[in-house]
Image (tube, grey):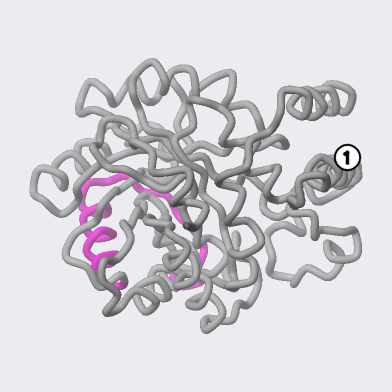
């Protein structure tokens, strides 16, 4: 029995969907050439990663039109072509791009409907299992955008609707229009803020939570080094991110070292410890974990059945307190 078979599936809020405790994230496989890209990627390796994740029991894939300005969705569509049963597909709206591949924000009704039609074409499916607002921008358009998602659900183009990167106040604003079924916040040891804001609210409201970047975009994988950071491609967005630059880089690499030390007696990697830390929160339904090769999937898939002891959680908390 694989790891997912041992731990079972989890109820995603009140959607009626049962999801594996991790889903495959596809941000990185979108490739480079846009402002939040990860540099050039090998599509064949990306397809192998998707198929390996599905073979391992992962039953949902998270993607977005903006990832590679459509490329990630195209790769996912190619990987899943002819696959039955296929995993659930979760994608997003609100980020468009111009001719120079510069990202622009829109929550206008017509823009959202056009995005959904394009996503359905790239993914090669008649409907979406979950559609999420990627970012609450422009702030003055979130009600219009949310009404558009509710209309698409009523029309049968999407089964469920949710939001990503929303604050509690923004969720409350749109809850008056239609129920928010899922929430996708960043949540990791490096970025734990959701623990004190949106996660308690989601738990009270019965909103399913899909936490993203539990490994802090590779910082907590155990494989990141200063040398590797220095070798990141010029069009990898992480080169400009404060967490990958001093003084935070040294702190984050020391944290990854601690996670490796915690995992070592159990035969677990720093990546598995980082994912287990995110999944330990009862408000979190599942975590989105990226991979660009089958080998990377094999490197974290067994995080699903790993539980941190209270002493290990306290060790992480003490590190965070002493390294703010």
- Residue depicted at 43% across the width and 51% down the height: 5
Q: Position of residue 147 (x, y in %)?
A: 20, 36
In the rendered image, which quarter is residue 232 located in?
A: bottom right
Residue 219 appears in view: no
Q: Report helix, strand or loop for mark 1.
A: helix
Q: Find the residue positioned furthest to the front.
A: 1
- Residue depicted at 15% across the width and 54% down the height: 157
Residue 109 appears in view: yes
Q: 206 left or right of 262?
A: left
Q: Magenta span covers which residues?
A: 99-122
Q: Looking at the image, how many numbered discs can be counted on the residues?
A: 1
Residue linked to disc 1:
251
Foreground residue among 314 and 190:
314
110 in the magenta segment: yes
Q: 305 left or right of 143?
A: right
Q: 32 left or right of 80?
A: right
Q: Residues within 10 Å of mark 1 (few under 14, many from 20)?
A: some
Foreground residue among 309 and 241:
309
Q: Quadrant of the C terminus?
A: top right
- Residue depicted at 63% across the width and 36% down the height: 307
Q: Position of residue 9 (x, y in %)?
A: 38, 43
């Amino acid at each position: 029995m694989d790891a997912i078979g041992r731990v079972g599936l989890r109820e995603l809020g009140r959607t009626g969907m049962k999801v594996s405790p991790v889903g495959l994230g596809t941000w990185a496989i979108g490739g480079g050439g846009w402002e939040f890209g990860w540099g050039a990627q090998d599509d064949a390796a990306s397809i192998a990663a998707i198929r390996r994740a599905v073979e391992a029991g992962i039953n949902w894939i998270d993607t977005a039109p903006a990832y590679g300005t459509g490329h990630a969705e195209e790769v996912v569509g190619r990987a899943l072509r002819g696959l039955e049963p296929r995993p659930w597909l979760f994608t997003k709206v609100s980020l468009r791009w111009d001719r120079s591949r510069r990202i622009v924000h829109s929550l206008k009704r017509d823009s959202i409907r056009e995005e959904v039609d394009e996503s359905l074409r790239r993914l090669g499916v008649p409907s979406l299992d979950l559609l999420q607002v990627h970012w609450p921008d422009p702030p003055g358009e979130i009600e219009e955008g949310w009404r558009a998602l509710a209309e698409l659900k009523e029309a049968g183009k999407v089964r469920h609707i949710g939001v990503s990167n929303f604050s509690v106040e923004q969720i409350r604003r749109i809850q008056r229009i239609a129920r928010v079924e899922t929430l996708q916040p960043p949540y990791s040891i490096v970025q734990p803020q959701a623990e004190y804001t949106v996660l308690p609210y989601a738990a009270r409201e019965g909103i399913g939570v899909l936490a993203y970047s539990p490994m802090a975009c590779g910082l907590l994988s155990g494989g990141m080094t200063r040398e590797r950071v220095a070798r990141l491609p010029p069009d990898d967005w992480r080169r400009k991110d404060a967490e990958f630059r001093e003084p935070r880089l040294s702190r984050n690499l020391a944290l990854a070292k601690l996670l490796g030390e915690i995992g070592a007696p159990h035969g677990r990697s720093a990546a598995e410890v980082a994912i287990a830390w995110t999944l330990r929160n009862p408000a979190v339904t599942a975590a989105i974990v990226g991979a660009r090769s089958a080998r990377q999937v094999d490197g974290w898939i067994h995080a699903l059945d790993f539980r941190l002891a209270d002493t290990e959680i306290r060790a992480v908390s003490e590190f965070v307190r002493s390294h703010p």
